[in-house]
C-alpha cells in the first residue's frame, strides 16, 4: 500500500508515539529508531567529517506531514532550531492537498564549473579556439570519473564567456557536468583541475580559479500548487496574501525576509539530508536578484475560483549520495524516511516544502500574525525550563499566555501553585 502522509493528530502525540507511527509506516528498524534518538556519531566518523573536532551538537528532527508531490505522498524529515516551521509547512501542505498537492518539474542535474583564464589574447579568438577543442576537453574531464560517465552523467558541454573586472578582463570557460544524484562539487572540481593544463595550452593563457559555481541555474526546480481559499481563511486572506507578495516582489527589505521564510523550509530538509545548505542558500538568493532587483522567489495569483495559486522556481543543487551523506547515519536515515530514489525527487520535495513554508508564513502574517503560534511554543519551552513535565507543560504555557507574561519567573510561580493543588 502507498504511504499516506496525512497523519491526523500526529502533532499531539509524544515523541515515542510518533516514532512508533513512523516506524510502522516506513518499516524502520530498531537501529533506525536508535539513530533518531540521537545515537552518538563515532569518533572515527566525526574525524572524517571535519577538523579539530571536540564533540557533537544534537538538534531536533521533526516530520512534516500532509505533503503530496507529483501524486506521491512524503513524510519529510526537517532539522531546525526554529519553532513553528514544521507545523506551518504541514499546515500549508494540508491546504494544498485538497487541490491535488504540489506539482514539480526539474530542469536536469547539470552543474557549472568555472575556469578563470588570464590571457591577453582577443576574446573572440580564445572562444573559437576553446570551442574547437571541446571534444578533447570533455574527454579529459570525463577520464577523471568513469563511474559517473558509465551511469550516463559526466561533462557534457563547454561555454565560453568574458567578464570585465576592475583589474583586467577575464575569459571564463564553463564546464557543464551532469552530476546525476550527487551534489557534484568534488567531481566537477577534479574535472576542472584536469582540463586546466590543456586550457592553458589552447588559450595561451594562465588558468587561475578552478571551481564549481553555486549559481546552479541549470539545476532548477519549479513547484506549483493551488491553496484552497477556505483552508487559508477565506477570499480576503487570498487577496491580502497577494498584497504581501506584491510588496515582497518590489521591496528588498520585505523580499529578504519573505525568501528567508522559504529557506526555513528548504534548509531544514537540506540539514536533515546532509546537503550543502550554504550552496543552496547562496544560489537561491542570487537567483532572486537575477533581473537586477532582489525579488520574491515565489509568484502568486488568484484562480478563477478565488483560490491561491503559487509557484516557486529555484536553483536546487542537491544530492542523495557522496560527501557527508555517505558517512553520517542520520542523513541516510532521513533519505530512507523521505523514500526518494533520486536527487531530482529530493529537489522536487524540497521545493514543495519551500512553497508551503512561504504560503504558511504569508497566511499567518496577513491573519493572526506569526507571534501567536510562536508564543505557544515559546511558552512551552519556558515552562519546561522552569521544571514543568508532562501535562503541566501545556497548563503552565496556557496560564502564561492568558496572563500575557511569558518568562521564567511566571512559569515557576504558575508551576508552584499547580503543584500545591496536587
Ligand atoms: C521567520 O523565520 C520567517 C518569516 O519572517 C517569513 C516571512 O516573514 O515571510 C515569518
Image (spheres, rainbow, N blue to C red):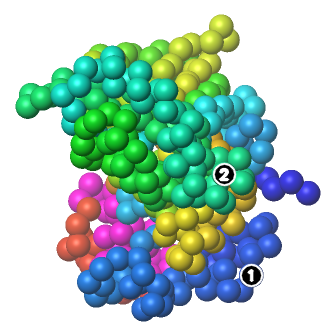
Q: Crowdedness of circle 1 by 10 Å Cα count: few (<14), some, many (20+)?
A: few
Q: Give the residue at the far bottom of this rendering.
A: 43
Q: Is residue 364 visible?
A: no
As displayed, is residue 184 above or below residue 218? below
Counting labels gives: 2
Sequence-first tag of 2 and 1 = 1
Q: Position of residue 5 (x, y in %)?
A: 73, 52
Q: Is residue 388 magenta?
A: yes
The residue that disc 1 covers is: 29
Q: Which of the 4 quarters of the picture holds residue 16?
A: bottom right
Residue at 28 percent across and 36 percent down: it is 204
Residue projecting furthest to the top:
304
Q: Mark 2 points at which residue?
A: 149
72 vs 121, left or right, is right
Residues in magenta, as a range: 378-405
Local secondary structure at mark 1: loop
Q: Does the residue labelled 1 lie within 8 Å of ligand 1?
A: no
Q: Which residue is drawn at 53% across and 87% down?
A: 39
The answer to whether the residue bearing label 2 lies less than 8 angstroms from the nearest atom of ligand 1 is no
The residue that appears at 42% across and 30% down in the rendered structure is 130
Residue farthest to the left, as pictured:
167
Principal SS element in the magenta part? helix
Name the residue furthest right.
1
Q: Where is residue 238 in the image (x, y as percent from the top left)?
A: 51, 20
Q: Which of 410 and 369 is in front in this view?
A: 369
Q: Does the magenta stretch include residue 77?
A: no
Amino acid at each position: 500500500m502507498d504511504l499516506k502522509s496525512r497523519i491526523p493528530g500526529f502533532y499531539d502525540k509524544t515523541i515515542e508515539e510518533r516514532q512508533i507511527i513512523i516506524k510502522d509506516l516506513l518499516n524502520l528498524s530498531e537501529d533506525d529508531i536508535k539513530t533518531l534518538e540521537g545515537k552518538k556519531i563515532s569518533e572515527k566518523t566525526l574525524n572524517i567529517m571535519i577538523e579539530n573536532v571536540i564533540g557533537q551538537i544534537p538538534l531536533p528532527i521533526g516530520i512534516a506531514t500532509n505533503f503530496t508531490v507529483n501524486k506521491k505522498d512524503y513524510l519529510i524529515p526537517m532539522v531546525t532550531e526554529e519553532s513553528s516551521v514544521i507545523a506551518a509547512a504541514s499546515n500549508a501542505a494540508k491546504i494544498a492537498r485538497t487541490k491535488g498537492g504540489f506539482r514539480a518539474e526539474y530542469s536536469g542535474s547539470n552543474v557549472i564549473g568555472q575556469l578563470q583564464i588570464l590571457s591577453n589574447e582577443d576574446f573572440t579568438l580564445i572562444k573559437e579556439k576553446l570551442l574547437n577543442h571541446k571534444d578533447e576537453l570533455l574527454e579529459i574531464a570525463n577520464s577523471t570519473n568513469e563511474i559517473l560517465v558509465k551511469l550516463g552523467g559526466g561533462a557534457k558541454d563547454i561555454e565560453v564567456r568574458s567578464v570585465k573586472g576592475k583589474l583586467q578582463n577575464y575569459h571564463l570557460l564553463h564546464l557543464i557536468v551532469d552530476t546525476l544524484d550527487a551534489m557534484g562539487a568534488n567531481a566537477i572540481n577534479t574535472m576542472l583541475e584536469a582540463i586546466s593544463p590543456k586550457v592553458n595550452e589552447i588559450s595561451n593563457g594562465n588558468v587561475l580559479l578552478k571551481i564549481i559555481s553555486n549559481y546552479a541555474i541549470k539545476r532548477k526546480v519549479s513547484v506549483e500548487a493551488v491553496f484552497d481559499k477556505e483552508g487559508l481563511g477565506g477570499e480576503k486572506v487570498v487577496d491580502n496574501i497577494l498584497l504581501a507578495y506584491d510588496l515582497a516582489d518590489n521591496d528588498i527589505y520585505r523580499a529578504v525576509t519573505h525568501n528567508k521564510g522559504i529557506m526555513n523550509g528548504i534548509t531544514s530538509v537540506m540539514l536533515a539530508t546532509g546537503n550543502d545548505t550554504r550552496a543552496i542558500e547562496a544560489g537561491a538568493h542570487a537567483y532572486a536578484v537575477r533581473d537586477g532587483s532582489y525579488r520574491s522567489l515565489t509568484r502568486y495569483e488568484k484562480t478563477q475560483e478565488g483560490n491561491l495559486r503559487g509557484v516557486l522556481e529555484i536553483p536546487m543543487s542537491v544530492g542523495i549520495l557522496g560527501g557527508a551523506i555517505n558517512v553520517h547515519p542520520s542523513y541516510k536515515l532521513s533519505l530512507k524516511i523521505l523514500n526518494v530514489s533520486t536527487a531530482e525527487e529530493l529537489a522536487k520535495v524540497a521545493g514543495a516544502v519551500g512553497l508551503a513554508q512561504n504560503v504558511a508564513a504569508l497566511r499567518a502574517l496577513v491573519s493572526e500574525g506569526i507571534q501567536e503560534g510562536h508564543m505557544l511554543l515559546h511558552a512551552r519551552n519556558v515552562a519546561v525550563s522552569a521544571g514543568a513535565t508532562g501535562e503541566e507543560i501545556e497548563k503552565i504555557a496556557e496560564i502564561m499566555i492568558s496572563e500575557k507574561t511569558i518568562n521564567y519567573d511566571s512559569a515557576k510561580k504558575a508551576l508552584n501553585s499547580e503543584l500545591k493543588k496536587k
